[in-house]
Image: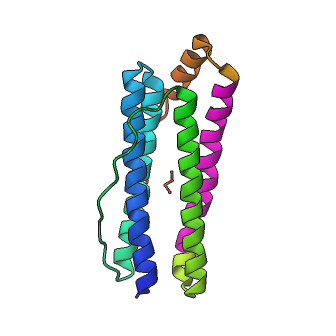
């Protein structure tokens, strides 16, 4: 049985992950409105991935005998200024999520909950990847500046991203 403190922390993180999905869906809408369909597609895949992250916590909490409690999801921004600012906002958000995951890891260690510590390891590694992939896009957009040709080239590239819901292990 999971401790009450970890149950509360996981419920908070389910909300953070669902908010992440909501934020990226809002970015998807903004990019679509800017006719940058490749970037909109990238955000759509990102939102789907965040939903998966939320449900992975959801399933784990139930498996450990905890109670899932869903909270209201905050309203995300709707205007992101320009592609660089949008991806920079995404990078800032991922850094915030990394901090949340690290704090949960600290709590799992303090609570002596080895199963949760091992479970959270997946998110620790995932955050390294998430930050790195967004950071690469931020760097490329910074180099491209206002050059529309460069922006459209990157947009075309980001159109190929897809997300497939991973098979659940038995
Ligand atoms: Fe974007 O990260 Fe979830 O965990």
Q: Main secondary structure of the magenta part?
A: helix
Q: Position of residue 39 (x, y in %)?
A: 48, 28
Q: Which quarter of the rendering shows the N terminus? A: bottom left
Residue 132, image quadrant: top right
The span shown in magenta is: 118-142
Left or right of residue 36: residue 141: right
Q: Nearer the viewer, residue 22 or 44?
A: 22
52 w.r.t. 107: above or below: above
Q: Position of residue 124 (x, y in %)?
A: 60, 62
Residue at 42% across, 32% down: 79
Residue at 58% across, 59% down: 98
Q: Nearer the viewer, residue 92 or 28?
A: 92
54 w.r.t. 91: above or below: below
Q: Position of residue 48 (x, y in %)?
A: 39, 46
Q: Is residue 165 visible?
A: no
Q: Position of residue 70 (x, y in %)?
A: 29, 66
104 w.r.t. 160: above or below: below
């Amino acid at each position: 049985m999971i401790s009450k403190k970890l149950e509360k922390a996981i419920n908070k993180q389910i909300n953070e992950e669902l908010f992440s999905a909501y934020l990226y869906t809002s970015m998807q809408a903004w990019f679509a409105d800017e006719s940058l369909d490749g970037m909109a597609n990238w955000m759509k895949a990102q939102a789907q991935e965040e939903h998966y992250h939320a449900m992975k916590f959801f399933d784990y909490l139930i498996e450990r005998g905890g109670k899932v409690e869903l909270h209201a999801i905050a309203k995300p921004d709707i205007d992101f200024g320009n592609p660089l600012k949008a991806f920079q906002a995404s990078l800032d958000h991922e850094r915030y999520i990394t901090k949340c995951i690290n704090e949960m890891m600290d709590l799992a260690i303090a609570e002596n909950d080895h199963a949760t510590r091992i479970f959270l390891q997946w998110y620790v590694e995932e955050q390294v990847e998430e930050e790195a992939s967004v950071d690469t896009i931020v760097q490329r957009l910074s180099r491209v500046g206002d050059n529309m040709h460069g922006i459209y080239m990157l947009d075309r590239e980001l159109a190929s991203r897809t997300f497939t819901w991973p098979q659940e292990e038995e």
